[in-house]
Amino acid sequence: MNAAFAAGIVLTVAGLAGYAVGVTVAYPGRAFSVTGVMVGVTLLSVGRGSAWADPDEASPEGESLDQGGDSA
């Protein structure tokens, strides 16, 4: 499992739990639970993208990574 993906899971779950508690009980800093959810979802998407990438198709050996342009 990718570290970014795992951190995304933890932050998303913790943020959702903090938000649920914040709906019922007012506590200082409860707005940070929304930030935790946003950062967690971002890390989930970043971690999932790199975990699902096929290393053989990502950058085959011997293929130029130059995306074009004028070589003259």
Image: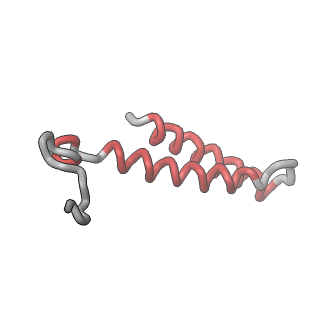
Quarter of the rendering containing residue 56:
top left
Task: Please name the colour scheme applied to the rendered image.
Answer: secondary structure
Q: Is residue 54 left or right of residue 13?
A: left
Q: Outermost residue toward the front?
A: 72
Q: Residue at coordinates 82% horizontally, 49% vertically from top-left?
A: 29
Q: Nearer the viewer, residue 67 or 1?
A: 67
Q: Residue at coordinates 48% horizontally, 40% vertically from top-left?
A: 4
Q: Nearer the viewer, residue 52 or 18?
A: 52
Q: Is residue 63 left or right of residue 67?
A: left
Rendered-image quadrant of the N terminus: top left
Rendered-image quadrant of the C terminus: bottom left
Q: Residue at coordinates 79% horizontally, 51% vertically from top-left?
A: 30
Q: Position of residue 61 (x, y in %)?
A: 14, 40
Note whether 45 is above or below 62 in the view shown. below
Q: Position of residue 47 (x, y in %)?
A: 42, 45
Q: Position of residue 25 (x, y in %)?
A: 83, 53
Q: Is residue 37 left or right of residue 4?
A: right
Q: Outermost residue toward the left?
A: 62
Q: Residue at coordinates 51% horizontally, 43% vertically from top-left?
A: 9
Q: Position of residue 53 (x, y in %)?
A: 27, 47
